[in-house]
Every structure is written in structure tokens, then in C-alpha cells.
Amino acid sequence: MSAEKIEPAAADSHAHHRMAFFRQSGWVMLTMTFAGGVMYAVHPIVARHVPKEEYGVFTTLLQLVSLMGIPAAGLAPVFAQQVAAAVTETQQRQVISTFHGVCRAIFFFWLTMAVGVAVFWKQVLASLQISNPTALAATVGVGLVALLLPVMTGLLQGRQNFIWLGWINIINGVGRFGMICLIILVLGAWAAGAMTAVLIGMAAAIAVGGWQTRDVWGVENVPVNWAEWLRRVVPLTLGLGVATFMLSADMIFVQKFFPAKQTGYYAAAGMIGRALIFFTQPMSMVMFPKIAHSAARSQKTDVLALTLGATALAGAAAAIGCTLFPWLPLRAAMYDKTFLEISTPLVPWFAWSMLPLTLSGVLINSLMARSRFAAVPWLVLVAVGYGVALAAVGSHSGNLPDTQAGLRQIIQTLGGFNLLLFGVCAWFTWGRKSSSPVVPT
């Protein structure tokens, strides 16, 4: 065959892959944006119908759930990577056997965590200024489904079953919103009821994920090299857990160090900033299995450039919009007048502080998909430094007479460490060649 015929065929194939990427990204982004919008709509409902301090508790518990899920942070990408790279029947059965073992381990890990919370029950309630213990009990229950959900979504992601991955997002969001409306608006509950609604929504998503992966439940187990599996999942968990920690930790420290009536205002501005992550995250989800698939076959791909470029454009546009019209997202979300007055000045700070974390998330996913684990210790070091800085800044800022200035200091700390995180990610992506071998699959 002549070169003239081969080159157009290669170009057509390349164009087809690009179209498939944007089509799949578009669907996942659409469903996640819809689900995120529905979940976001939960916040003004809660904020308008419960005391401000109870809204702060609710938002803090949501971030606590994110932190509780860090041990499972590596599960979705690990299963996505393994499923995407499993090209033989033996490899596929090993992935399924691993799935069975991990689900059992998750339950016992959660049980241990629940016992630990029970032991320090009073201390946790006091530290997070929780008035109704039922809110903490519901949060512990959410912890179990938060640990299991990444396993389900990882299998679907690795199979590139983005259709049902999207529907799970929708079910989770709509279920949460519907139950919030029932429990808060009809039954008149506060943070405890809101967390119960979160539990029901996530449980519905788990049920659908279990149904979509039902073909793996009856498969007979085969021996699994758990040492090899842990060698892959531990760095993935730590690497991706860093992004989760950077996204969620600030609210915990604000709830601990600042007056309870002020934390709700910080939470409202924080939800605007965190929306940048939720809006752009779908592209990274689509990118991960494609990079893992290409790495397993030593193929080149431009999917990182496409994802990073689209994420940068979307994130920068959102941050500029929040700078020019900081009141608009709060008003669009129907927060009341007090939120508009107090939270609006914090919105631009949050938007620009979250932008480097948004880009870092793309690079972390790329590094982990390629098994470039040499970056992980440095990423963890940034997260540890951030935690120490939050504790120091929070203990000082929480006592300032000007609460707004204190909250800005927390956000500035977040922005500074997010920039540092992006620098580390960029260095390991482009500045040095990985010395870590690609983990065999």
C-alpha cells in the first residue's frame, strides 16, 4: 500500500479518536455538571432554611466525608488502569478477584474507622461544633458508601462505560437533592437531616453501580499478587489523595478555629471556588483510562494536552467571571442577602486560589496513569506542609477582630500551596524524566 493511502488513514483514525474523546468527555461533563449543579442547589436550600452555624456544620461534614474517602482515592484509578490494561482472560479474572477482596477490606476498614469515631465521639462533636450527634452518625454511614463508590466507578471507567458512569453521577445528585427537599423543607431537619439525605443519594448510586457490575460478583476468584497490587495502589492513593486533601482541608480548620456563625459564609464562598474542580474533573476522568491504555501499549497520545488546555481555558474563564461579577454565582444560587454581603468579597480569592489546583488535578491524574510514582513523596510533602500551615494560620486568624481578614488569610494559604503543588506536578510532568519504571499490568 502506498504512503499516500496510509497517511490519510492514520489521520482519519487520529481524528476519530479525538472526536471520541470529546464526545465521551462531553457526556461525562454534562452529567457531572448537571449532578454538580443539582448538588450545588442543595446548599442554598440548606443555607436558607437552617441556622448559619448549622450550614457551616453541614459543609464541614461534606468535606470530612471527602477526607474519609482518601484511603479509597487510588481505587477508582487503579481499577480503571487495571481494567483498561487487562487484555487477556487471566488478567481480567485477576482484576475481578481483586475487586472482591478490596470490597471485603473496605468494609472492615470502615468498621475500624467507625469504632474509632465512637471512641472519640464527644471530642469530635466538640471540635467540629456539632450540636446534633445524629449528623455525625449519618456522616459515618456516608463514609462507607464513599469508600465503596470509587470501586464501582473505577470498573466502569476502565471499561470506558461512560454512559452509566454518567448516569451514576445523575442518580447521586438527583437523589441527594430530592431527599434534601423532603427532609429539610418538609420535615424541617437541619444538618443531621441533610447528611442523611446525602447518605440516601450515594446509596442509590452504589446500588446502580452494583447492578452495572453484576457480572463480576459471581466470578470465581483466582490468586492475586496482593503485594504487587499494593505497590500500585498505595502511591496512587497518596498521589490522588493529595488533591482531595488540598480541596477539602480548609473547611475543617475554619470550622475548628473560627466562630460558628461565620463558618457558613466561608462555606458559601468555598462552594463557588470548589465548583471549578467539579466542573473540569470529568475531562480528567475520561483522560485517565486512555493514558493508562496507551501507556500499557507504549503508544503516544495527545490526550493530556487536550485535557490540560480545555481545563485551563474553562478554569480561567470561570475565575475571571468570579472576579468581575463575584456576587453573580451567589445570587444565581439564591443565597440570601447576608451571604451576598459577607461571602461576596471572598469569591474572587477562592476562584483564583482553586485554579492551580484544578490544573494540578489534571497533571496528577496523568502522572498516576503513567505510573510515574517518583512524584508522590513530593506531592505528599506539599500536603503535609499545607496542613501544618493551615493549623498555624487558623489558630492565629480565628482570633482576629476582623473575621474577613482572617478568612482571607486561610484562602491565601490555600492559593499559595496550590501554586506550589502545580509547580511540583509540572516539574515531574515536563521538567524531568521519570526514573520510576512503569508498573507492569
Image (cartoon, rainbow, N blue to C red):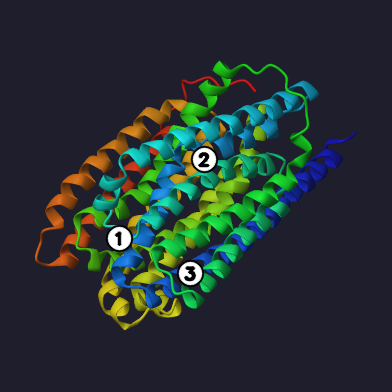
Q: Looking at the image, is 58 positioned above or below residue 77?
A: below
Task: Write down the residue under mark 2.
Answer: 365
Q: Name the amino acid, label 1.
A: Ser
CA–CA distance in space, label 2 to label 3? 29 Å
Left/right of residue 1 with respect to residue 128 in the rendered view: right
The residue drawn where x is 17% and y is 61% is: 406
Q: Name the amino acid, label 2.
A: Asn
Closer-to-camera residue (243/362): 243
Instruction: Tell me if I can see residue 372 in this picture.
Output: no
Closer-to-camera residue (22/271): 271
Element under label 3?
Answer: helix
Task: Write down the residue under mark 3.
Answer: 42
Decide: few, some or many residues near mark 3? Use Cα within 10 Å; few <14, some 14-19, many ≥20. Answer: many
Mark toward the start of the polypeptide (1 vs 3): 3
Give the residue at the far right of this rendering: 1
Task: Write down the residue under mark 1.
Answer: 131
Q: Position of residue 320 (x, y in %)?
A: 39, 68
CA–CA distance in space, label 1 to label 3? 21 Å
On the rendered image, what quadrant is the C terminus found in? top right
